[in-house]
Amino acid sequence: MRILTCFKIVSETESLLPSELQAICNQEYDWAYAKKVIGGYDEAALETAIRLWDDICGAGGIDDAGGAGLYALTVGECADRFAENLYALGFREVAKITPRADVDYAPFHVASLIYSYVKQHRGFDIVLTGRQSSPGENALTGHILASLMGVPCIPNVTALSFVGGKAAITAKTAANSYCSMEVNGRLVCTVGEVQHPYLRIPTLREKMRASKKKAIAFEPPDDEALIFQENRANMELIGYSFDLPDKNCVYIGGGMADKAAEMLRLIEAGGTRAASYSSPEPGASSDGNAQGDVI
């Protein structure tokens, strides 16, 4: 069995300050310089693929002659550290497609590029994508890809395993209920909120074996790269919008009795939104009493 997982490298916004997020909204700051990470749902898809492959290997019957294994593909940039990490985790091939234009808001174009890679490899048994990724968050790419491949698309998958030669899938519906099914045949799954959303960490030995491995550059033929392409002549990016965190923090100083009294007053006044936080600071006493608490 051959499994392809599509992922995207995105700019992390979780570590940005509210002032920096506001600057991005005002287009005063280019978030392209923010830390790069694998998109959240895409990371979950990669870990799901590894766990699925573990199930398949445990069931036996792997025919390596047909190129069985895990494949990963991204449309866009892919720093060496991402490729090396995936190789260390057991991916047989990590590939990247460098688009000739911005594809953040072009799900049809992205799907056509992925489809070109799928055709070049004579198809895959299962293709996994994250449910959506920033900044577009369109949640369309997997569905369009399935249409091009002529296979079913199972959206918002929350669990995926291999049982009795079939893919056992649990997916979340639009009504917030769950449905389970077994699928025998090729398909595309968009991975949502799974039980294990974070990519495992390879061992040092695995990292050493994969050191200096790079993503393979794939260049789609011109005619295949343009199967679908959005008409963006009348499209213009106006700006971004973030749900800025609403924080109301108070620094409490003084001795332990003063801290306790002030925390009690704030709690009675209903001014707290989170549990208290205390951490040792330089000059704190040996019993761990910090100079101040944040609530």
Image (cartoon, rainbow, N blue to C red):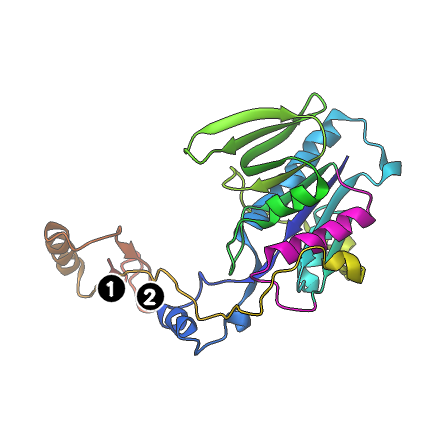
Task: Indicate the position of residue 132 as horizontal and vertical percent values.
Answer: 53, 50
- Do we see residue 205 in this rendering? no
Q: Is residue 281 above or below residue 200?
A: below
Mark 1 is on which residue type? Gly
Query: On the rendered structure, is 286 left or right of 130?
Result: left
Q: Secondary structure at mark 2?
A: loop
Residue lying farthest right?
A: 65
Neighbour tally class for label 1: few under 14, some 14-19, many 20 plus, Cα within 10 Å:
some
Point out residue 41 in the picture as x, y percentages from the top left corner: 54, 48
Query: Which tag, 1 or 2, sits closer to the chain's start?
Result: 2
Q: Badge 2 local density, few (<14 within 10 Å), some, or many (20+)?
A: few
Residue 139 visible (yes or no): yes
Label drawn at residue 292: 1
Residue visible at 43% across and 70% down? 239
Q: Are marks 1 and 2 in contact (CB under 8 Å)?
A: yes
Front residue of this view, candidates 216 and 260: 216
Determine whether 16 is above or below 275 in the image: below
Q: Please identify the quadrant where the N terminus is shown.
A: top right
Quarter of the image where one finds residue 170: top right
In the rendered structure, the answer to whether residue 220 lies left or right of residue 276 reads: right
Q: Quadrant of residue 188?
A: top right
**Does residue 101 lie above or below 133 as drawn?**
below
In the picture of the structure, the residue carrying the numbered disc 2 is 281
Q: Residue at x 53, y 69 (%)?
A: 234
The quadrant of the rendering that contains the C terminus is bottom left
Q: Which residues are magenta?
A: 100-124
Residue 130 part of the magenta segment: no
Q: Residue furthest top?
A: 164
How far, Cα to Cα, is label 1 from label 2? Answer: 8 Å
Three-letter amino acid code at the position of disc 2: Glu
Q: Secondary structure at mark 1?
A: loop
